Each structure stands twice: as C-alpha cells, then as structure tokens.
C-alpha cells in the first residue's frame, strides 16, 4: 500500500485501537476484533501486530496503573499516532477508489450454482 505498509490484520488492529479510543489494551482489542469480525485472535498474533505497528510509528503505548487483579502488572494502553491515522485514512482511500472503479456489470453478475 505504498508508503503505508499495512497488512490486513494490522489494518484491523489499527482501526480497533481507534474505535476503542482510551480503552485500547490487549484484551479489549482482542475481544473487540473477535466480536466484530467473528474470528478468533491469538494473543501472540495480536502482540506481534501491536509491536510492529508501534515500531512503524503508527501506535503509541503507555502503561496504565497496576492492579492486584493483574498480579501488580499494569495494562498497556495503545493510541493511534498521527502516522497511524494517516495510514488508515490512506488504506480507506485506496479501498474506496478500487471499489468505485469496479464496473457495475462486474457486481451485477449472477452466478449459477
């Protein structure tokens, strides 16, 4: 996708972080994706994607307060950066352009089963 290199799962994670604004941490992101897309998400795949997106400068993480429920470990909250916002806006623009350029006849085809 040009200057914004995003895989499909990375795009979904970025969008979900945006949707969960202020409440985006590992478990909430995982549950939101599973609920919205009706697909399971492994913790490892999510953590890898979050790390890659942070390394690309699309996400920023910040530790929350420690809680006894988590054995004293703080939650790690994620927010979109300006580059992350630009990346998802670019992805949306490209998808919309491609969709808009599909000839109507291609979408109206009836397939025999």
Image: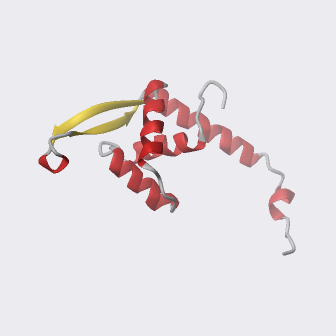
Image quarter of residue 31: bottom left
Query: Is 31 situated above or below 7?
Result: below
- The quarter of the picture where the C terminus appears is bottom right
Number of callouts: 0
Q: Is residue 22 above or below residue 32?
A: above
Would residue 23 be found to the left or right of residue 83 on screen? Answer: left
In the image, farthest residue toward the bottom: 113
Give x and y (percent) for residue 98: 73, 43
59 left or right, relative to 95: left
Q: Residue at x 67, y 38 (%)?
A: 94
Front residue of 27/43: it is 43
- The figure's colour scheme reads secondary structure
Task: Out of 70 and 36, give the one closest to the viewer.
Answer: 70
Which residue is painted at 72% across and 48% down in the image? 99
Residue 103 x %, y %:
84, 52
At x 36%, y 35%, the residue is 79
In the depicted view, which residue is nearer to us: 98 or 26?
26
Query: Residue 52 appears at what percent x and percent y?
Result: 48, 31
**Residue 47, how many percent across, how many down?**
42, 40
Quadrant that contains the N terminus: top right
Q: What residue is at 45 percent from the left and 25 percent from the top?
A: 55
């Amino acid at each position: 996708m040009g200057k914004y290199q995003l895989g499909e799962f990375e795009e979904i994670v970025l969008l979900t972080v945006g949707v969960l604004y202020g409440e985006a941490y590992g478990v909430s992101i995982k549950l939101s994706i599973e609920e919205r897309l009706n697909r399971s998400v492994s913790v490892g795949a999510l953590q890898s994607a979050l790390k890659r997106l942070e390394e690309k400068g699309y996400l920023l993480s910040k530790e929350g307060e420690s809680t006894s429920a988590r054995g004293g470990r703080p939650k790690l909250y994620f927010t979109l950066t300006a580059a992350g916002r630009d990346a998802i806006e670019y992805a949306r623009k490209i998808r919309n352009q491609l969709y808009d350029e599909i000839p109507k006849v291609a979408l109206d085809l009836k397939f025999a089963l």
